[in-house]
Image: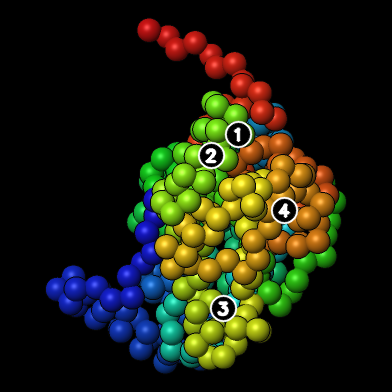
Amino acid sequence: MSEIKPIESAPTEDSAEETDWAAAKAFFDSLKTEKPRPPKPRYAVTIAVSSRTLFNMVEERKIYEEEGLEKYVAHQVEHESEPLKPGAAFPFVKALMTVNTRLRALYPDSEELFDIVLMTNNHAQVGVRLINSINHYDLTIERFCMTGGKSPIGYLKAYMTNLYLSKDSEKVTEAIEEGIAAATMFMPDTETQLSDTQLRVAFDGDAVLFSDESEIIVKKHGLDTFFQHEKQFENKPLAQGPLKCFLEALGKLQRKFYAKNERMNCPIRTFLVTARSAASSGARVLKTLRSWGLEIDEALFLAGAPKGPLLQKIRPHIFFDDQMFHIEGAKELGTISAHVPYGIGQKYNRGKLIEQPEKKE
């Protein structure tokens, strides 16, 4: 899994990089601009978003699929002065920028900020429309990676990515296999008014923050065996899941607000929204978070009840879950959802085993 970037590293590996960054900072500071400079990647919480998650490119995608690459690029160039419409990740990105504004006010020289990278397999010719759209909405996105039709996954580690969001489930799966937190984003079926002062992030537990070890027991042996297992191993922390390090990164930034007595006015709020029952299997989850030194602001145990209505009240900028039926239920009620294709749950739909294609010899 992707690791939290260190606050400090060994001087031997830092000297050249620190010299380069000091020179870049001095040059940037000498220029007159109201634009905030990007933070150093090694200290930042880096969020890589694809162009199709940041913007709604359904029409453009249709041209690509039906008429081919050349027509698609020509269309983008022809319409490059027209800003693209916001996509599923747009409110999340705006909320990240709000947190950065608050952090800069409290810590003017800090490099511990969100850094947003546009990670796309679009061709460079399309870049002008993307840049124009970003500037139209006044988004602070300075780092781009446009790979001209090739998969951008190989660049995620080079950009020191903490979280990758895409519309392409295959690329997301590839990123998770590389140890990078990732999810496939979905637009909600209805629009919901979201907070413009607080980033709100909701996580499922098993196979998202935690591994799927307990979910395997549910699927293979049933709830009673699962309850017994969780009671027996209540004091043994669960292994980490693909999104644990992103929660850890959020916690690191939250603590910067707490240090300034801003806990009650913190612009980041996290939620655990789990199908687990509190009395039967909740203690192990909370003790695991405690053993990791992590806090969750609100823990909601639903005991199998639908998540959609509760998420409708929370109104998160993003909700992560490994089960597609929870994603579908959430987006039907207006929640921006992100599917984490990880664990045994990918072999099941609504509790029923999906027939797997036979492997060829």
Q: Is residue 189 above or below residue 218?
A: below
Secondary structure, mark 3, is: helix
Disc on res. 336: 4
Numbered disc in front, either 3 or 2? 2
What residue does disc 1 label? 224
Numbered disc in front, either 4 or 2? 2
What residue does disc 3 label? 100
Q: Quadrant of residue 359?
A: top left
x then y, percent, for residue 294: 48, 67
Q: Quadrant of residue 112?
A: bottom left
The first of marks 3 and 1 along the sequence is 3
Q: Amino acid at mark 3?
A: Asn
Left or right: 38 with respect to 13?
Answer: right
Kindly identify the residue that appears in the image at 14 percent across and 73 percent down.
Answer: 12
The first of marks 4 and 1 along the sequence is 1
How far is mark 4 from mark 2, CA to CA?
Answer: 35 Å
What residue does disc 2 label? 228
Residues under numbered marks 3 and 1 in contact, where contact means CB atoms less than 8 Å apart: no
x then y, percent, for residue 339: 61, 44
Residues under numbered marks 1 and 2 in contact, where contact means CB atoms less than 8 Å apart: yes
Q: Amino acid at mark 1?
A: Asp
- The crowding category of the residue bearing disc 3, from other C-alpha atoms within 10 Å (few below 14, some 14 to 19, many at least 20), is many
